[in-house]
Image (spheres, grey):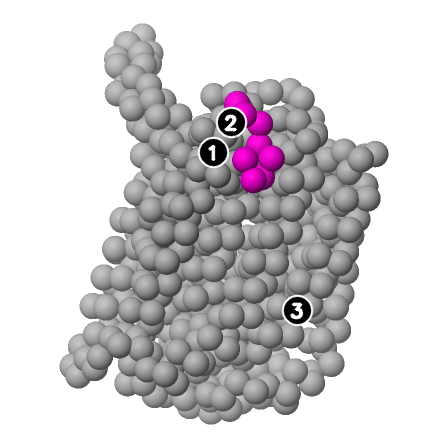
């Protein structure tokens, strides 16, 4: 029923019919809730990995935390590459040109597979040296290197997952990607259960039995994750190619060779996004270098707190995806007033929800960190820095969702520069200043200040409105 309501409301955009505020709010909710579920399930995989590996001790946890920012960099680049094509599809669907939308999809498959294969080669090449570059302790370098090597080998699967999910969401289908991402989370739990731990005796109701296990430790954690991603990517691509009403490859298929015009538009969207992801993850890598000398406890606490905070801001990214779809289709239908309305609705929704999540995170910080590690020093430090970050969540939401609005219209260049300037000019400067005297708490205080600043400048740009008329992107 909800799927039918969503499609009917989306058709009002394409057909140029008026929409009441209630209809706009309903459509925003219908698209946001599944997207939030997908985002939460995605970060839950990292939470699960961290919890299972955390039980092996601080070194195992730190080995993953050391390279986590680099894995996010690679993942962010894959997401940016996929978005360059999925936004074009949203514009074409908004204008009712489904045949052209299918054409863009076909070309995107070839383009992103080539791109992700190049990333895989780069990742494999640097995997042995990366932990040393990041200043990791000798005790954790081997596991960190192996973790990143396995992650890199499966980049094409991760890329197809991003592409298929983005295409479905931009067509208005949030339900299937969210369901498959939840399945991926469940598969990750199952695979990790058997791959991380060795065979062991388990007692239940007075009966003991042997649970088989590979005992791979850190390598088992990433192996379980990439296997879950591989299965999900296959299922997502199958649904998109065979079952999607708007994008399935039926009838006149056309070619998979990317055209110059399609690639040009994709680059104009993706390159600034890739630059923004590189700026964020590069800053996180620099933060890791700042944190690394503080010791293994600080590295592990930093890693766990980042994952825990992700549970708080993932709703913002879910709403941001809904904003991209709504704004993109409104632009495709040339409905600027409706575009503005959806932009405001989604941004305010994100700020309210993440403000509430921030309050919950402040209260439950000790319990959230406690699930991931039995080490008391890590628990205490992790809870303290989480509570610092809780105050920044509403403004963090403003920057996340507003960025999704700008992505929806294809105007990613200026927002990417804003993010770069904020992170490198404010966060890293303050972190380098605070860390020597305040330790990890100073690093997270710098992050809190920067997120509030970034949210403010994004709101100023959004509400001034000039960005709509200064776009150079041509549909």
Q: Magenta includes 139?
A: yes
Task: Say whether disc 3 or disc 2 marks the residue closer to the N-terminus.
Answer: 2
Q: Which residue bears the numbered disc 3?
A: 417
Determine the residue positioned at 34% across, 37% down. 223
Q: Which mark is residue 144?
A: 1
Between label 3 and label 2, give the one nearer the viewer.
Answer: 2
| Residue 348: image location, x then y, percent | 66, 67
Distance, label 1 to label 3, CA atoms, is: 31 Å
Query: In which quarter of the view is residue 300 placed?
Result: top right
Q: Is residue 382 left or right of residue 258?
A: right
Say which element carries label 2. Answer: helix
| Residue 462: image location, x then y, percent | 68, 76
Q: Magenta includes 163?
A: no
| Label 1 crowd (10 A; few <14 / some 14-19 / many >=20) | many
From which residue to which does the magenta span run?
A: 132-140
Determine the residue positioned at 52% across, 23% down. 139
Q: For the N terminus, which image quadrant?
A: bottom left
Marks 3 and 2 close (CB-CB < 8 Å): no
Marks 1 and 3 close (CB-CB < 8 Å): no
| Label 3 crowd (10 A; few <14 / some 14-19 / many >=20) | some
Q: Is residue 438 left or right of residue 126?
A: right
Front-most of residues 382 and 178: 382
Front-most of residues 254 and 148: 148
> In the rendered image of this protein, does residue 313 appear above or below residue 380?
below
Distance, label 3 to label 2, CA atoms, is: 35 Å
Q: Which residue bears the numbered disc 2?
A: 140
> In the rendered image of this protein, does residue 94 appear above or below residue 364?
below
Task: Say whether disc 1 or disc 3 marks the residue closer to the N-terminus.
Answer: 1
| Label 2 crowd (10 A; few <14 / some 14-19 / many >=20) | many
Say which element carries label 1. Answer: helix
Say which element carries label 3. Answer: helix
């Amino acid at each position: 029923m909800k799927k039918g309501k969503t499609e009917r409301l989306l058709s009002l955009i394409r057909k140029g019919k008026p929409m009441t505020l209630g209809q706009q709010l309903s459509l925003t909710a219908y698209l946001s809730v599944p997207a939030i579920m997908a985002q939460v399930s995605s970060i839950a995989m990292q939470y699960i990995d961290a919890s299972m590996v955390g039980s092996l001790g601080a070194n195992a946890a730190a080995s993953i935390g050391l390279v986590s920012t680099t894995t996010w960099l690679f993942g962010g680049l894959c997401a940016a590459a996929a978005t360059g094509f999925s936004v074009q599809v949203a514009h074409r669907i908004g204008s009712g040109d489904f045949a052209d939308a299918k054409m863009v999809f076909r070309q995107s498959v070839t383009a992103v597979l080539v791109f992700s294969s190049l990333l895989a080669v780069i990742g494999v090449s640097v995997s042995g040296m990366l932990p040393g570059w990041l200043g990791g302790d000798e005790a954790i370098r081997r596991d960190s290197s192996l973790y990143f090597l396995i992650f890199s080998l499966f980049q094409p699967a991760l890329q197809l997952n991003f592409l298929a999910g983005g295409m479905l969401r931009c067509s208005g289908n949030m339900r299937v990607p969210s369901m498959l991402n939840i399945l991926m989370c469940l598969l990750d739990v199952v695979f990790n259960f058997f791959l991380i731990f060795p065979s062991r005796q388990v007692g239940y109701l007075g009966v003991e039995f042997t649970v088989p296990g590979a005992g791979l430790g850190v390598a088992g954690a990433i192996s379980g994750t990439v296997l879950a991603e591989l299965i999900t990517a296959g299922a997502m691509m199958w649904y998109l190619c065979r079952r999607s009403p708007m994008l399935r490859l039926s009838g006149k298929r056309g070619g998979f060779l990317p055209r110059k015009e399609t690639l040009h538009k994709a680059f104009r969207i993706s390159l600034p996004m890739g630059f923004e992801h590189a700026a964020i993850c590069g800053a996180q890598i620099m933060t890791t270098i700042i944190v690394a000398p503080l010791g293994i406890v600080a590295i592990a606490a930093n890693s766990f707190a980042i994952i825990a905070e992700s549970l708080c801001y993932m709703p913002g990214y879910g709403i941001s995806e809904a904003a991209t779809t709504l704004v993109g289709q409104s632009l495709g239908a040339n409905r600027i007033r409706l575009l503005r309305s959806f932009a405001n609705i989604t941004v305010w929704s994100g700020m309210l929800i993440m403000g509430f999540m921030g309050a919950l995170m402040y209260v439950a910080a000790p319990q959230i960190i406690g699930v991931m590690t039995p080490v008391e020093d890590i628990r205490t430090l992790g809870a303290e820095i989480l509570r610092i970050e809780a105050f920044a969540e509403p403004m963090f939401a403003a920057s996340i969702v507003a960025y999704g609005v700008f992505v929806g219209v294809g105007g990613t260049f200026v927002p990417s520069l804003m993010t770069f300037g904020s992170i490198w000019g404010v966060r890293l400067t303050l972190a380098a200043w605070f860390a020597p005297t305040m330790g990890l708490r100073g690093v997270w205080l710098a992050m809190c200040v920067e997120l509030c600043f970034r949210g403010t400048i994004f709101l100023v740009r959004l509400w001034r409105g000039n960005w709509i008329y200064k776009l150079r992107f041509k549909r």
